[in-house]
Amino acid sequence: MRKKVKVLRISDIFIYSAILFFAVITLYPFVHVTAISFSGYVSLMESNIFIFPRDFTLTAYKSVLSNKYIFSSLLNSTIYTVTGTLLSVFFTMTMAYPLAKRHFTGRRLFSFLITFTLLFSAGIIPVYLVVNKLGLMNTIWAIVLPFLISPWNLIITRTFLEELPVSIQESAIIDGCNDIKTFFYIIVPLSFPIMATIGIFYAVYHWNSYFWPVIFLNTREQYPVQIILREIVIQGTVADALNNSEEEVLLSESIKGATIMVATLPILVVYPFLQKYFVKGMLIGSIKG
Amino acid sequence: MESLYELKKKIKRDRYLFVLLSMGLLYFIIFKYLPYINLTIAFQEYDLVYGILKSPWVGFKHFKDFMNSIYFVRLLRNTILLNVYGLIFGFPIPIIFALLLNELKKIRFKKVIQTVSYLPHFVSHAIVVGMVLSFLSPSTGIVNKILVDVFRIEPIYFMADPKYFRPVFVTMQIWKSFGWSSIIYLAALTNIDPQLYEAAIVDGAGRWKQLWHITLPGIKNVIIILLILRMGNMLDIGFEAVLLMYNPLIYDTADVLSTFIYRRGIAGEHGIPDFSYATAVGLFKSVINLMLVLAANYLSKKYTEKSLF
C-alpha cells in the first residue's frame, strides 16, 4: 500500500511507541497484581513491588485455595455459567430462527416487541418483584431465567440466520422436513459460528455477573465467585481507608492479589482460543444492530 | 389488507415456526412484559401483602418526593457528569487507537496488540475495581508509593475523598473498554478502498494528508453513528462498577440513579425496602432514557440517513 517507508521513519517511531504504550497500560495492572500475589510480607510493607514478585512465596495462594468459600463459589459460578449459557444459546436460536424468515407471519410485530424492551426497560425493582413472585429466589433459576435471552444477542443471531442460503432450507422442506426438523438438522449445524459467538457473550456475562446474584441469592453457599471476590478484595480495601491496623492490611494485600488471579485465570485460559469468534460476533452486531 | 382467511392460512403454514418461537416469547412475556405491569406500583404505596391490586394509590407522590429531595439534583448530576466525562475523554481514544493500529504493517504484531487490548473487556467489574482499589490504597498501593517517593507528597486517600471518584472511575472505564470499542472502527477502516491511498501517494500526499483526506472521511459515518448512540445512553453507566467501587464517604460524587434505586428498593437503606419509591425513580430514569434514545435515533436519521431501529 505505502512504499515510501524510509521517508516516514519518525512517524513510524511515534506510532510504534504509542501502540506499545497502549499495550503496556493494558497489561501492567495484571502483571503488577501477579507480582503482588507472589510476594512476601516485608516487600508488601515497603510496597516496592513493580513487575516481579519479591521474597517469592506461595502463602497467599495456599490460604486462598484452602478457603472453602472460594472453592464453592468457583464451582457455583461454573454451574451457573454452563447451565445459563446452554439454555440461553438454545432459546436464542429457536427464537431467532422464525424471526429470520422473511415470510414469517407476525415477524414485524414480534421484532418490534423485542426491540421495545431495549428502548424502554422496566427497571430493577419490577424484575425483582417478578422473580420474587415466581418463587425463584435463592435458586439457580433466579440467576439463569431472567436473563435467558439477550435482545442484542437475539438480533445478532437473527442477522446471521438471515444470511444463510434459503435454497438449502427450501430443499429440506420439499424433502418433507417441517420447520422444526429443518431447524435442528439443517440450521443448527450451519450455525456453529454464531452459537460460539453468543455462547461466549452469555458465558462471560454469567461468569462476571455480580449485581443480580447479590440480590437474588441469600446464602454464602450459593454465591458465585464475583461476590466472594468482592468480600475479600473490595470490602477489605474500604476498611483500609478507614484505618485498620497496618499489619492486618499488609497481610491481606497478597491474598487479595491471589484471589484476583484465581478468579481471572479461567478467563485468561480460554480467552485466546475464543478470540476470533467474539470479534466476528461484534461485527455482525455492529452492521445491523 | 389481508383477509382473516389468508391470515389463518399463513398461521397454519407457520405453525411449527410458532412452536419454535413460543418458548422465547414466553420468556419475553414473563421477564420483560410482566415487569411493565409492576411499574404501576410507582403510583401506589405498594405493600407485598396487599399486592398490586389492593395497595393504595398515591398518584405522583413518589415522583414529587424524589424531585423535591436533595438526591434528585445529586443523582442526576453524578449520572450525567460520569457520562459526559466518559464521552469527552473516552470517545476519541478507541478512534485514535484504531487509527494507530491501522498504520501497522506487520499483521501478526497487529493481531497480538488487538488481542491484548480486548482483554479488559472480558474481566469482571469486581476484578477491575479490586485492582484499582488495591493500586490506589494509601498504605500499600503503587500509585501512592510513586506519589510519595517521586513527587514527595502525602499519600492520597482516593476512596475517602469525593473529588477523586470521577477521574478514577472514568479512567477505569476507558481502560476497560477502549480496545473492545476500537473493533468497529477497525472494521470501518478495512472497508476503505486501497486505491484511494494509492492515488493519494501518486499525488504526493504524506501520511497526515492521507489521514485527513481519506481515512477520517472514510470512517466519518461510523463515528457519527456511535457518537449519537452513545448520547442516547447518557443515563446508563456501568452501574455495577459504581456499586462495587463507591462507599458512603463519597456518595456525594459517586452515587448514581441505579445505585440509589438499589439501596432504597432492595437493600433497604432506611430499614425496609421502599419498592414504590425506588420503582418511581427507576421509571423516571427509563422515561428520560427512552426520550434520549428516540432523540438520538432522530438525529441519526437526519445526519446519516441511517435509522438505528
Image: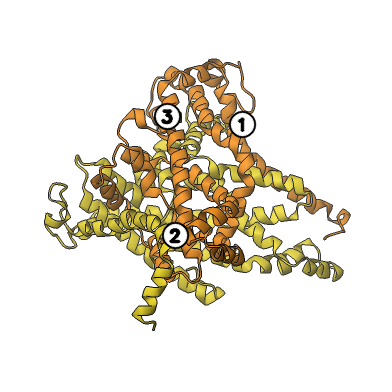
Chain colours: A orange, B yellow
Dot 3: within a 10 Å radius of its alpha carbon, few (fewer than 14), some, or many (20 or more) residues?
Answer: many
Q: Residue at x 67, y 69 (%)?
A: B217
Nearest the viewer among B186 and B92 is: B186
Q: Residue under circle 3?
A: A73
Residue B123 vertical position relative to residue A151 in the rendered view, above or below: above
**Callouts 3 and 1 on one subunit:** yes
Q: Residue at x 74, y 50 (%)?
A: A15
**Callouts 2 and 3 on one subunit:** no
Quadrant, the N terminus of chain B? bottom left
Q: Is residue B241 left or right of residue B63?
A: right
Location of residue B210 by image quarter: bottom right
Query: Which residue type does callout 2 highlight?
Result: Asn
Q: Residue under circle 1?
A: A31
Chain on which label 3 sits: A
Nearest the viewer among B72 and B144 is: B72
Dot 2 and dot 3 residues touching (CB under 8 Å): no
Q: How far separated are the C-alphas under marks 2 and 1?
A: 33 Å
Query: Which residue type does callout 3 highlight?
Result: Ser
Secondary structure at numbered mark 3: helix
Specify the label residue A86 is tagged with.
none
Chain on which label 2 sits: B
Secondary structure at numbered mark 2: loop
Q: How far separated are the C-alphas under marks 2 and 3?
A: 33 Å
Q: Residue under circle 2?
A: B233
Location of residue A95 by image quarter: bottom left
Q: Is residue B174 left or right of residue A120?
A: right
